[in-house]
C-alpha cells in the first residue's frame, strides 16, 4: 500500500487505525472474490434453477422441477424458490468435483427438506444449452 496523502496531517494513532481498516477491507474483498456465489439460471423448461459459481467459474447448476414446486407434500408453493435452492445447494457444494446439472424432483423433497442424498439426484446430460456457466462460457 502506498502513501496516503489524505493522512499526512494525522497522528500516528489515526494513521494506524486507517491502515488497519484498509487491510480489513482488502481482506474482505479477497474473501468475497473467493466466495461461492449463487444466482438464478435462465428458465428454459419446466424448472427453476440456480448457478453456483466461484471466481466466475460455474461449479453446479441446481434445478427444481415444476412438479416439485406445486406438489403438496413438497410444500414449496410459498417458498422463495431461488433462496431455497441456494440454501439447499450450499449444504453439499463443497463435495462437487466438476460442473454438473442436478434436478430435484418431487420424489426428492418432503416438507421443504431434501430427503434424497445429493449424489442420487437426477443428473442432466450436458448439452451446449446447459453446459454454459453464468458468464456464458462453455465448460470443457
Image (spheres, rainbow, N blue to C red):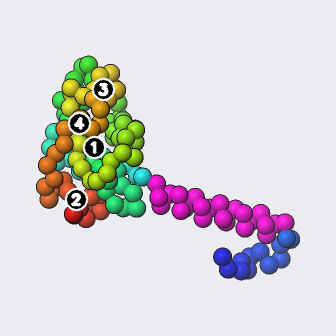
Mark 4 or mark 2: whose residue is earlier in sequence = 4
Does residue 78 show up? no
Q: Is residue 116 magenta?
A: no
Label disc, if present, on residue 62 of the rendered structure: 1
Residue at x-position 36% and y-position 36%: 88
Q: Which residues are magenta?
A: 13-35
Q: Please, what secondary structure does the residue beneath circle 1 have?
A: strand
Quadrant housing residue 92: top left
Mark 4 or mark 3: whose residue is earlier in sequence = 3
**Label 4 Cα neighbours within 10 Å, binned few <14 / some 14-19 / many ≥20:** some
Q: Please, what secondary structure does the residue beneath circle 3 have?
A: loop
User: Is residue 23 toward the left or the right of residue 42 in the image?
Assistant: right
Q: Which residue is identified by label 2? A: 132
Mark 1 or mark 3: whose residue is earlier in sequence = 1
Measured Cα–Cα span from mark 4 to mark 1:
10 Å
Locate residue 112, reporting x and y percent.
34, 26
Mark 4 or mark 1: whose residue is earlier in sequence = 1
**Above or below: residue 36 compared with residue 85:** below
Say which quadrant the C terminus sits in.
Answer: bottom left
Amino acid at each position: 500500500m502506498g502513501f496516503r496523502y489524505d493522512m499526512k496531517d494525522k497522528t500516528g494513532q489515526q494513521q494506524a487505525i486507517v491502515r488497519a481498516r484498509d487491510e480489513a477491507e482488502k481482506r474482505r474483498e479477497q474473501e468475497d472474490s473467493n466466495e461461492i456465489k449463487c444466482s438464478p439460471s435462465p428458465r428454459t423448461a419446466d424448472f427453476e434453477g440456480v448457478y453456483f459459481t466461484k471466481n466466475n467459474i460455474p461449479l453446479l447448476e441446481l434445478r427444481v422441477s415444476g412438479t416439485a414446486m406445486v406438489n403438496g407434500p413438497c410444500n414449496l408453493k410459498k417458498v422463495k424458490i431461488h433462496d431455497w435452492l441456494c440454501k439447499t445447494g450450499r449444504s453439499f457444494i463443497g463435495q462437487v468435483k466438476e460442473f454438473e446439472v442436478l434436478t430435484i424432483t418431487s420424489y426428492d423433497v418432503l416438507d421443504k427438506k431434501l430427503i434424497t442424498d445429493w449424489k442420487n439426484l437426477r443428473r442432466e446430460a450436458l448439452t451446449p444449452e446447459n453446459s454454459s456457466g453464468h458468464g456464458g462460457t462453455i465448460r470443457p
